[in-house]
Image: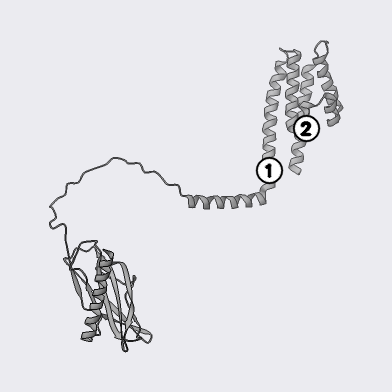
Amino acid sequence: MIKLVRLTLLMALLLGGIRASQAQETKPIGYFLKDSVKIGEPVPYVFSYRDRKNRTVIFPDSLYNFAPFELISKEYFNTRSDTTNSIDSAVYYLSTFEIDTVQRLSLPVFLIIGSDSIPNFSLTDSVILDQVVTQMPDSVAMEENSYYRPVSLEFNYPYAIIGLIILGIVAIIVLAVWGKEIRKRIRLYRLRKGFDKFKSEFDIRIEALAQDTTKQNIERILAYWKRYMETLENLPFTKLTTKEIVLLMQSSSLDETLKSIDKNIYSKAVVSALQNDFEFLKDYSQDRYNHITEVIKNG
């Protein structure tokens, strides 16, 4: 089928060239290969021009206005020349969406003369519109459909990637300029939250000590204090003995207090001054917290 169409087009082009040669016309020749066409249906339009050999001519291309037709595609053929003349030819595949009964078309070739171009139009050829709908009804019954149909939203990946890149650049700039100050404030905030929680919980445990002076409870309160100090000082308080803690912290008051608490845990003597000892541990933690926060602020 394709070979047959190409053969038909070639014969039509040759016929156009013969017509031009016999009549010695200087106008381009353009005509449709079909007498009728439907709306939107492609129709071939053969276009050829005979002129002096080696003279530059330009055929219409995709930028040309083919109204009332629209260009679908085009096919150019090699120039055929004899001793004095040359024939250029092309086939334009056009379609129309106009509703006029007769559709007409005339195309130009542009003759290049110096720095100027002169259009030379072919005779007008026409094609009849084959109308499928011959009579429009007076009214059309429309079906109403007001149901909501949800449409899934597509994620805009290009914008998201651009946004992430911009966010990353801003984050790098912020960290480079204010990174140290930001880390300092974050650390101070965490230390304050941790100390407030410790102080509140430790006060509750000290108050409850009056009703429960068992050695197990005393040991639990001391272990809670050690866990907080381990977080505050970043030292293994929970794994150190009293002697090792005192040696590390270099505090005689802390030495006396921890030894007093150990005596209440491990000796058979009556429990005494426990609340004062734990109050001291709380105040000692307060002093260490204040010292560490000042070091961070001035660092």
Furthest toward the bottom, the residue is 84
Q: What x and y, as percent, mark residue 92?
A: 28, 70
Closer to the camera: disc 1 or disc 2? 2
- Label 1: element kind: helix
Q: Which mark is residue 270?
A: none
Q: Quarter of the image containing the N terminus?
A: bottom left
- The residue carrying mark 1 is 183
Front-lying residue, 198 or 102: 102
- Label 2: element kind: loop
Which of the 4 image quadrants contains residue 144? top left
- The residue carrying mark 2 is 235
**What kind of colouring is applied to the model shown?**
one colour
Counting labels gives: 2
Q: In this rendering, is residue 249 above or below 171?
A: above
Q: What x and y, as percent, mark residue 66?
A: 27, 70
> What amino acid does circle 1 point to?
Arg
Q: Is residue 293 visible?
A: yes
Mark sitting earlier along the chain (1/2): 1
Q: Is residue 105 visible?
A: no
Q: Quarter of the image containing the C terminus?
A: top right
CB under 8 Å between callouts 1 and 2? no
Whether residue 110 sits left or right of residue 139 in the image: it is: right
Rate crowding at label 2 as few (under 14), some (14 to 19) or many (20 or more) other CA atoms within 10 Å: some
Whether residue 174 sits left or right of residue 241 in the image: it is: left
Front-lying residue, 67 or 27: 27
Front-lying residue, 294 or 102: 102
Residue for point 28% across, 69% down:
6
Rate crowding at label 1 as few (under 14), some (14 to 19) or many (20 or more) other CA atoms within 10 Å: few
Q: What x and y, as percent, mark residue 261?
A: 81, 19
> What amino acid does circle 2 point to?
Leu
